[in-house]
Structures are given as C-alpha cells and as structure tokens.
Amino acid sequence: MKRMRRSTLAAVLLGFAALSSPAWAQSAAPDLESLRRDIQNLRAVIDEQRAAIAELRTTLRRLEQAVAEAGRRGEAAREVTVTIDRQPVRGRPDAPVTIVEFSDFECPFCARFSQDVFPKVDRELIATGKLRIVYRDFPLPTHPYAEEAAYAAICADQQGKFWPMHDTLFANQRALDPTSLRQYAKELRLDAAAFETCMQSDGPKADIERDRHDGVEAGVRGTPAFVIGRTVPGSTVTGEMVIGVQSFEAIRAKIDSLTKR
C-alpha cells in the first residue's frame, strides 16, 4: 500500500513537472487522462488517511473516557503505603494531607492534570497549607522520551529547580528530545556543566528505578496515579490509590474527608 501511494504521488509530481517544463511545448501533449486518474487516486489516499485520523481520535476519546470513568468509580480504592523520602515536595511539611503522584512527563493524561488541574490545586490547596504533593517518576516503556525527561527533572532538582523544570516539561511535551532538554536547562539558568554531569551519571536512573519499583508494588498500572493520605511523621504516606486524572473537586472532597475524621 505504501509503495502504491508513493508511486501515485511520484507520478502526479512528474506530471506537473512535465507540464511546467519549457520543453513540454515542443513535445507531445501529456496523457491528461492518466494524470486525472493519478489525481483521483491521490485524493482517495488523502480521504483514507483522513478517515484513519478520525478513527484514531475516536479511539483516543474512548480511552480518555475509560480512564476518567475508572477514576470516578474509585476502582483502586485500596489502601497502600509508599515512601516519600528524598522526593520532590511542594507544600508545607505540616499540611494535614499528602498526595504522592506517580507520573510520566510524556503521558498526555499527566500533562492534562499538570496543566488543567494542578495550577488550581497549587493555588487553593497547597499555598493555603491544606495539602502537600510529592512527585515520583513512573515513565512508561511506550514513551521513548519519558525516562530522559525524568533525568532532566531529577538533575534540575539537584539545583533546586525541580518544579520549574516539571512545569516546562509538561508545557513542552512534544519536544522532550535531548537537545530540547538541554535548552530548557539553559532557559532555567541551570549550571550547564553540573546538569550535563548529572544527565550522564547513573544517579537519576537509580532514582527512577526505585520509583518505578515502589509504584508497581503499590499497584500503579497507569499514569497519573495518586496515593492520598493523612500526613504523619516519618517518610511514608498511607492512603488510597486512585488511578487516572483527578479533578480539583475530587481532590478537595478527599482532603475534607480526611481532615474531618
């Protein structure tokens, strides 16, 4: 099929080239009927591709709905315990509720949470001392740039810039290649030499493997996934695991439930 499409396109282009060539006036008239057939074939290929794109969009919407429905059903209403030691934290240490987020910088659902939900959570719940959030990496194997993007966030964290890098990566999710990651580090005014040394070291990989292992043990099956529990002394959080994008209202309701006990 691909070869047929390429040959059809080539035939059409050659035909147009022949029509525009100065030598055409001195040559025999081209086979216009053949060109018309090639154009019709090309239009058929374009229509086929449009139909395929429409089908992919429909499939994506269904997947998004399935993830949202899974979150609403609370299918993962299981109590688990996860560690938060040496992880990036946003919020006051004495906030009554802690959320541990397992996320993937290349995951579109994670980006949706980061860009559509998290700003309001940050403004109304974290900044007011009601919540703190702990980030843990869970790059999925189907996302080719997710792990190196996690490297970049870990290396930015070593220079006190995890959250600015976190926001930058999600805002530029379609550009997570190595060159882009180093450009983001430059824009955030990170020490370039220290950042590169970190990116080439084994430290970030060990951190990611620990996060992934802990996530699997806790029952993470997709991203984003959240463990929501009361804040207690120590380096662990025990709470319910929920999978899928959570709304601001759902998070606020969970906080109210935990703090009224």
Image (spheres, rainbow, N blue to C red):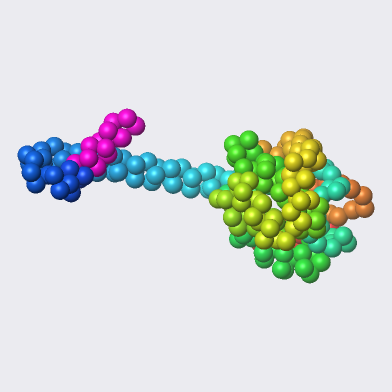
Residue lying at 17% horizontally and 46% vertically, measured from the top left: 21
**Can residue 13 be found in the magenta stretch?**
yes
Please name the residue shown 60% across and 39% down the image.
Answer: 144
The answer to whether one can see residue 141 in this image is: yes
Does residue 248 appear left or right of residue 84 in this picture? left
Q: Which residues are magenta?
A: 1-15
Looking at the picture, tell me which residue is in the foreground, 32 or 62. Answer: 32
Magenta-colored stretch includes residue 181: no
Q: Main secondary structure of the magenta part?
A: helix
Q: Quadrant of residue 198?
A: top right
For the N terminus, the image quarter is: top left
Q: Nearer the viewer, residue 75 or 246?
A: 246
Is residue 139 or residue 241 the one in the foreground?
139
Check the image and report above or below for 86 versus 219.
Answer: below
- Residue placed at 92% from the left, 49% from the top? 234
| Coordinates of residue 107 in the picture (x, y in percent) | 60, 46
Q: Is residue 218 visible?
A: no
Residue 172 placement: quadrant: bottom right
**Residue 74 on image: x %, y %:** 66, 46
Residue 136 on image: x %, y %:
75, 47
Q: Is residue 72 left or right of residue 130?
A: left
Q: Position of residue 246 (x, y in %)?
A: 65, 54
**Would residue 176 be found to the left or right of residue 48 on screen?**
right
Q: Please tell me which residue is depicted at 68% across the width and 58% down the height of the picture.
A: 186
Instruction: State the quadrant of the C terminus.
Output: bottom right
